[in-house]
Image (spheres, grey):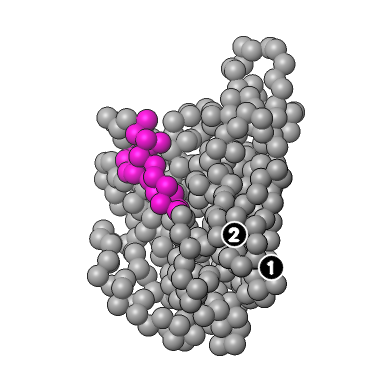
């Protein structure tokens, strides 16, 4: 999408993410139902199955393994189970089935309408509702915009492995909430785990899923629009650059470029970012209106709550199951250098050594 928003031919079908106003509201309504709180409960079993499969697969790895790769397989397996009932990628094998992707996509809307009645397309429960949700635009383009790639999970594990104190504190919280033998996938407890959610927020602040932010366009034929003191001609695309805004010291300080989850905690829970020996005041600024990793307003990501639920479940199960460290010889600074903005965030390899924990 990107630079071409607002420049498509007049007969080009428009996807939900590009719409605004009454048509956006109409097309968004079925998606809201597919991701409401009742629907999320139905997806827990899917996440549970794939998360446990991921742990089993990782437990069979010997020596260094590319965690980023396995997280990618898990994410696409989960999304396939939930929405399309086909595994484009499979965490239980070692190859990406790229040759299968295009032929399977060829089925288009017919496949969607005949798919899993308990998944997202089950929530979009009949062809009329599905037509409203998708409009007349290609289904693949709209589904592509729903697909997370797991960058937030991969980044979170990189952040905590490069910050041992944070790693231990997070694992201690998980162990206290889920003692040996208890189910770390119990979502009713995750929402109350303050440090877990602080670590997730800080990861999403520094490396949001969509680095370059939410794009909007002044529709052709609507006349110019004003935004504050600025006049924006019709057909012009503008966007809020999430990566820059969420690292701006006016909205997040101190140390806006530093991974410091405590900024999201209450003052009584917070530890100083300057070390235990620092006794001076710490003026903490956290402007939550500038924290928009899933966009904002009417166009906020409809799958936000599902993404957070999946992230909490995987992180808790991973740290309950394994001790992890970066592989010897891996330059930790490579991670941020290899991140690419491809509409959604693309990351490089993350070689780690996993040791099963003795409960």
What is the x, y in percent for residue 71? 40, 53
At mark 1, the secondary structure is helix
Say whether residue 335 is magenta. Answer: yes
Using the rendered view, name the quadrant where residue 120 is placed.
Answer: bottom right
Residue 194: image location, x then y, percent = 67, 41
> Which residue: 65% across, 65% down?
222
Please, is residue 150 above or below residue 219 in the view?
Answer: above
Are the residues flagged by discs 1 and 2 in contact, CB closer than 8 Å? Answer: no
| Magenta run includes residue 130 | no
Image height check: is 345 above or below 89? above
Question: x%, y% of residue 258?
Answer: 54, 28
Alpha-carbon neighbours of circle 2 within 10 Å: few (<14), some, or many (≥20)?
Answer: some
Q: Can residue 48 be seen by looking at this rendering? A: no
Instruction: Give the SS element for disc 2.
Output: loop
- In the image, is residue 17 above or below residue 26? above
Q: Earlier in the sequence, mark 1 or mark 2?
A: 1
The residue nearer to you, when weighing 111 against 44, is 111
Number of numbered callouts drawn: 2
Above or below residue 127? Residue 291 is above
* Residue with the mark numbered 1: 21
What's the CA distance linking mark 1 and mark 2? 16 Å
Can you tell which of label 1 and label 2 is closer to the viewer?
Answer: 2
- Report the residue at 28% width, 72% height from top: 100
Using the image as rendered, state which of residue 181 and residue 264 is in the foreground.
264
Can you give x and y, in whole percent of width and height, for residue 189 in the image?
Answer: 66, 52
The residue under label 2 is: 234
Q: Is residue 201 visible?
A: yes
Q: Which mark is residue 150?
A: none
| Magenta highlight range | 333-356
Q: Is residue 110 left or right of residue 196?
A: left
Q: Kindly identify the residue that appears in the image at 57 percent across and 50 percent down.
A: 239
């Amino acid at each position: 999408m990107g630079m071409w928003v607002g420049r498509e031919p007049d007969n080009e079908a428009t996807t939900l993410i590009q719409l605004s106003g009454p048509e956006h509201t109409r097309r968004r309504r079925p998606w809201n139902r597919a991701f409401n709180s009742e629907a999320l409960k139905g997806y827990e079993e899917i996440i549970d199955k794939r998360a446990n499969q991921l742990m089993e697969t990782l437990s069979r790895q010997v020596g260094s393994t590319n965690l980023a790769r396995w997280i990618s397989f898990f994410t696409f397996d989960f999304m396939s189970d939930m929405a399309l009932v086909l595994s484009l990628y499979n965490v239980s094998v070692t190859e990406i089935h790229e040759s299968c992707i295009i032929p399977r996509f060829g089925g288009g809307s017919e496949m969607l309408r005949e798919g899993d009645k308990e998944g997202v397309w089950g929530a979009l429960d009949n062809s009329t509702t599905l037509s409203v949700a998708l409009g007349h635009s290609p289904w693949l383009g709209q589904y592509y915009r729903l697909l997370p790639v797991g960058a937030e999970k991969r980044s979170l594990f990189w952040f905590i492995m490069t910050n041992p104190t944070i790693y231990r504190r997070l694992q201690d919280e998980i162990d206290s909430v889920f003692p040996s033998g208890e189910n770390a996938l119990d979502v009713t407890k995750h929402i109350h785990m303050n440090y877990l959610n602080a670590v997730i927020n800080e990861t999403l602040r520094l490396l949001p899923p969509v680095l370059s932010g939410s794009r909007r366009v002044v529709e052709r034929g609507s006349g110019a629009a004003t935004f504050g003191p600025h006049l924006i001609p019709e057909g012009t695309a503008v966007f809020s650059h999430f990566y820059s805004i969420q690292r701006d010291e006016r909205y997040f300080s101190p140390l806006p470029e530093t991974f410091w989850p405590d900024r999201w905690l209450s003052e009584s829970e917070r530890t100083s970012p300057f070390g235990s020996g620092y006794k001076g005041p710490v003026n903490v600024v956290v402007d939550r209106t500038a924290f928009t990793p899933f966009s904002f307003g009417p166009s906020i990501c409809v799958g936000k709550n599902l993404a957070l639920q999946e992230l909490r479940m995987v992180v808790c199960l991973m740290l309950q199951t394994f001790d992890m460290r970066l592989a010897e010889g891996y330059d930790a600074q490579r991670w941020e250098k290899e991140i690419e903005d491809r509409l959604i965030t693309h990351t490089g390899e993350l070689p780690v050594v996993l040791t099963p924990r003795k409960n």
